[in-house]
Image: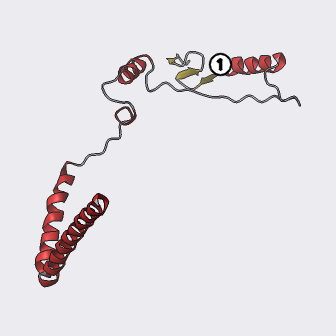
Amino acid sequence: MSSSSSSCSAENLGNAIESGIANAFYKVGTFVGTKPRITIVIGIVLTVLCGGGFVNWSTENRANKLWVPQNTIAEKETEMYQTYFDSNVRFNTLTVQAASSSKNVLTKDVLLAAMDMHHAIETTESNTTEIKISVDDGDDEKEETN
């Protein structure tokens, strides 16, 4: 008997919830149908009130604020890293491929050829009328021209 009375109670509860939701939608539908102008004005006013928050809208485009968690060890370490490595530091990558038919670039001959190429690039200088540019030191040096 207790299972039938509990199912009856659950059914009564479900019916009460369903009739309450149906009654609320009936009232809203009746209001909208009988007073469309007031409904439109209320909709516009609510949109303007809620849209007023867009005045304070700002986007964040600083990578350290977007991708580094704030007030953490990672943020402190990022700041320390930036003191040692300025953002103007450039990193270059070079891919070495063996000229011979062997696919292994880790042989002594290929590595020596790569070091020769590295040395040739590092010691190359470009001279303009007033500035000598060298890869070796990375700094521009003023040079007297005669």
Camera-nearest residue between 48 and 87 = 48
Task: Choose top left, top right, bottom left or bottom right for residue 94.
Answer: top right
Q: Secondary structure at mark 1?
A: helix
Give the x, y percent position of residue 20: 18, 69
The C terminus lies in which quarter of the figure? Answer: top right
x then y, percent, for residue 48: 16, 63
- Total marks in image: 1
- Give how far across and how far down residue 78 sits, in percent: 40, 23
The residue depicted at 84 percent of the width and 18 percent of the height is 109
Which color scheme is applied?
secondary structure
| Residue beneath the point at 89% across and 31% down | 101
Q: Position of residue 102 (x, y in %)?
A: 87, 28
Q: Is residue 99 left or right of residue 119?
A: right
Taking the image as shown, residue 146 lies to the left or right of residue 36, namely: right
Residue, disc 1: 122
The single residue placed furthest to the front in the displayed view is: 1
Depicted 23 relative to depicted 142: above or below: below
- How packed mark 1 is, by other alpha carbons closer than 10 Å (few <14, some 14-19, many 20 or more), is some
Q: Is residue 95 above or below residue 137?
A: below
130 relative position to 14: left or right: right
Q: Nearer the viewer, residue 111 or 36?
A: 36
Q: Residue at x 42, y 19 (%)?
A: 81
Q: Nearer the viewer, residue 28 or 22?
A: 22
Q: Quadrant of residue 3?
A: bottom left
Where, quadrant-wise, is the N terminus in this rendering? bottom left
List the single residue furthest toward the bottom. 34
Question: Which amino acid, mark 1?
Answer: Glu
Identify the residue at image location x=74%, y=28%: 96
Q: Nearer the viewer, residue 126 or 98?
A: 98
